[in-house]
Image: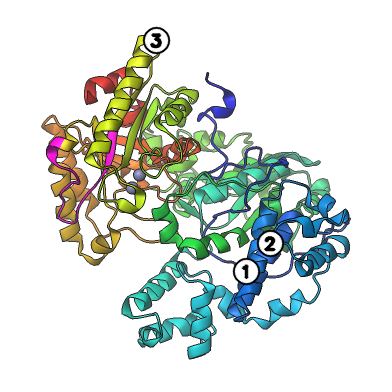
Amino acid sequence: MHTVSDSVFQRPPCNYHAKEALQPVPRVKNIRVPFSPMVNVASWSLPRPRRNGPPYHSKSNVVMVLEQVGVLLELKGANPFRVRSYQNASRTLGGLEEDLWVVTSEGRLTDVKGIGKGIAGLITEALTKGTWGDIGSLYTSVPSGLIAMLAIPGLGPKRIKQFHDELGIESIEQLKVAGEDGQLRELERMGQKSEQKVLDGIELLKRFSGRRRLDVGLLYGEALEARISSMDGVSRAQLAGSTRRRKETIGDLDIVAAVLPEDVESVTEQIVSLPGVADVKGAGSSKVSIILGTEFFSEEVMDSGLDGGVLEALGGDAYEEMASNTTIDAQVRLVPPHVFAFTLAYFTGSKEHNVRMRQRALDRGMRLNEFGLFPLDAVGELKGIEAAEFSLPVEKESEIYSHLDLQWVPPELREDSGEIEAADAGALPQLMDASMLKGAFHNHTTASDGTATLSQMAEAAQNLGWEFLGIADHSQILQIASGLSPDQLVTQSEEIRALNENWSDKGIDFRLFHGNECDILPDGGLDYTDSERGILDHVVGSVHQLPTWMKRDEDENTDALINAIENPSFTMLGHPTGRILGGRDGFAVDLHAVLRRMGELNAEGELKVVEINASPYRLDLDWRYCRYAKEQGVPISINPDAHSPQGLKDVWFGSQIARKGWLEQTDILNCRSGSDLEQLLW
Ligand SMILES: [Zn+2]
Ligand SMILES: [Zn+2]
C-alpha cells in the first residue's frame, strides 16, 4: 500500500507537482504556475527562438506570449473581445493535449476551439519562422512602468489603465505619491479603502521584491542542481544559499559545482545553453549568472488546488493571470573539486553563521573562507584560490566543522541563533523529519471547500503509510468556504464513526479524527455552541475574518486569541497570524504571550497545540517561534491544511520549518502513533 512515489519521505517537488520535473508528459493541464505575484519586467519581452527549429517556439512560449498580449491589449484599452480572444487562446492551448507542432504543421489550428484565423496565423509564424508578426511593437508601446505595476498584489490591468488614463501615472513611484496624496480615492469605483489597499500592496511588493517562496526556489533549485550534476565535466553539484537553509522565502539560487579548470569552459557553455535560460547575466571563469524562465520545465507544473482565501490575498484572478510569467535568478559557482566543500559551506551561509565560523578559525590560528581552511603560518599573505593548495584537505563539509571542534551543523540551523554554542557542546537537536510523521490534522473534504471526499482523503493518507488523518472542515460562519451547519457536522461525525468501525473490524491500524476548523470570532468566541462542538475529537481554531483583525492593535488581538484558546473545546491554533507569503502580512499579535498561556494550560493538564501550517504559502507558525513554543511546553502539529489528496504532501514543507525551528520528533504531535492519539483525543 505504501509506494515510493507516494512517500512523504521524499519531498514532493513542490506544492505544484511537477511529477517528473525533468521529463515531458504528454497530458498537459492548464499552464498555471502560481509562483508569486512578483512580475518580473525583464520577462515581459518576446522569447528568443530556439536555434534548431522548426518548431522555433515551445507551446509554453506561445501560451505565455498570448497571455501577455492579452494583458498588454487590456492595458492599452483595446476592444474587450480582442483581449478575450487572446486570453481564451492562451487558456485553450494550455490545456491542449495534442502536440502543438503537429497540429500547426497539419494546418489544423483553427479546428481548435477558441483559436481564430488571426491567432492561428500568428502561432504558425512563430513556430515555423520564429517571429511574431507585429506583436513586438505592442510590447514596446506599453510603458514598462505599467507592466511593473502588475506586480502589486491585488492590482490588475484594468485599474492600472484607469490610473494611467486619468492621472497619467506611469510608474509605481508615481502611483505611491498619488495614493499618499489621496488622489486615487477620488477616481470612479475607488474610494479610501481601495486606495489604502493599493498603498499596502506597494509596501508588500517592496518588501518581497525579488523574493520567491521556498517551494518555488526548491522546484527550480533542485532541477537545476540535477541538470548541472549530470553535465560532462561536473563531478558534483549542490544547491546552497537560503534555499538549502530552508528560509520561507528566498532571493536567488546559489549552486556550487565541482569542475576541473580545463572543463570550466565547456561546463559554462552547457549551462548557458540549458533550455529555459531566459538570459545570461554574466559568465566568468568561476561564476555563471543566469535567469531561468518557466520554460525551464518542459512540462507544465501543476497546481494542487489553492484555497480561495490564499488566492484572494494574492490578488485573485489577476494573480493567476500573471503568475506564469515569473523568472528566478541563479548563480552557479564553478570550483575545483578540492575546494568544493568550502565553497558550498560559504555560499550556504548565513552571513552571520559564517562570521562566527571565521572567528572560530581565527581563534585556532586559522583562516576560513570559500577557498579553504588555512593555518595562518603556512599560508602567509596568499589569498583567494591561489591559497587553496595550503588548505587543510577537506572532502566533506562536515570535516570543516570537525577541524573547528564542532558537530556538523545542519544547514537549516545556520542562522547564528545558538547553533555554534550547541555544536560546541555536542548538544545540537536531533531534528525531526517528514518520515517520522504518522498522520496529519487540519484537512478539508468536499463537505466544505476540499476537492476530495472523506474516503478519498483517508485513502490518500493510507497510501502515505499514515496511521491517522484529522479532518477539519470549515465551520458554519465561513459561508464562502461552505462551512458546515451543525446538522452537517453530526452527519459527518456519523460517517467518520462508520469508517473507523470498518477499519477497526478489519484490523487496519488507521482512523479518522473528527475535528473542525472552527472560526475564532473577533471577540475570541468560537463558532458553534459548546454542545455542537462537544461531538468533535479536536477543534482547530482559526482566524479568517482578517480585515477586522488587521485593523486592531496587538493587545486586542492577543486578548481575543487567548480567550479562544481558553475555551475547553479548543485544541489547536490554526495559521496563528494569517500571513500569506508574498500576499499579505499577518495580523498584529503577541505570539509569545499566546504560547505562554497555552503552556500554562498544558501544565494544568489540558491539550493546547499550535500548528505549523505547512502550506508553502503560509508556513505559519513562523520558525522563529518554534523553540519558544517548545520551551513553554506547547506541542506543535505540522498541518498540511490540505484541500486535496495531493495537498497532504505539503507536510514536507512544514517539516522543513520545524527543523529550522530546532524541533525534534517528540515535540511534534503528529509524530505520535494513531493509537496514542486515540487515547489523547477520544
Ligand atoms: Zn484556515
Ligand atoms: Zn483550513
Residue lying at 45% horizontally and 56% vertically, measured from the top left: 311
Check disc 1: other Cα within 10 Å, few if <14, some if 14-19, many if 20+: some
User: Disc 3 beta carbon < 8 A from ligand 2?
Assistant: no
Rendered residue at 34%/29% (across/down): 670
Q: Which residue is labeled 2 in the image?
A: 89
Q: Residue 267, position in %: x, y? A: 79, 48
Three-letter residue code for mark 3: Lys
**Residue 637 appearing in the image:** yes
* The residue stretch that appears in magenta: 515-531
Q: Is residue 489 left or right of residue 176?
A: left
Residue at 88% in and 56% down: 54
Q: CA distance from mark 3 to mark 2?
A: 52 Å
What residue is rendered at 19% in x and 50% in y? 561
Q: Is residue 400 magenta?
A: no
Q: How is the image coloured?
A: rainbow
Mark 1 sits on what residue?
84
> 95 and 471: which one is in front?
95
First in sequence: mark 2 vs mark 1: 1
Packing grade of label 3 (10 A; few <14, some 14-19, many >=20) is few
Residues 336 and 478: in front is: 478
**Residue at the extreme bottom:** 167
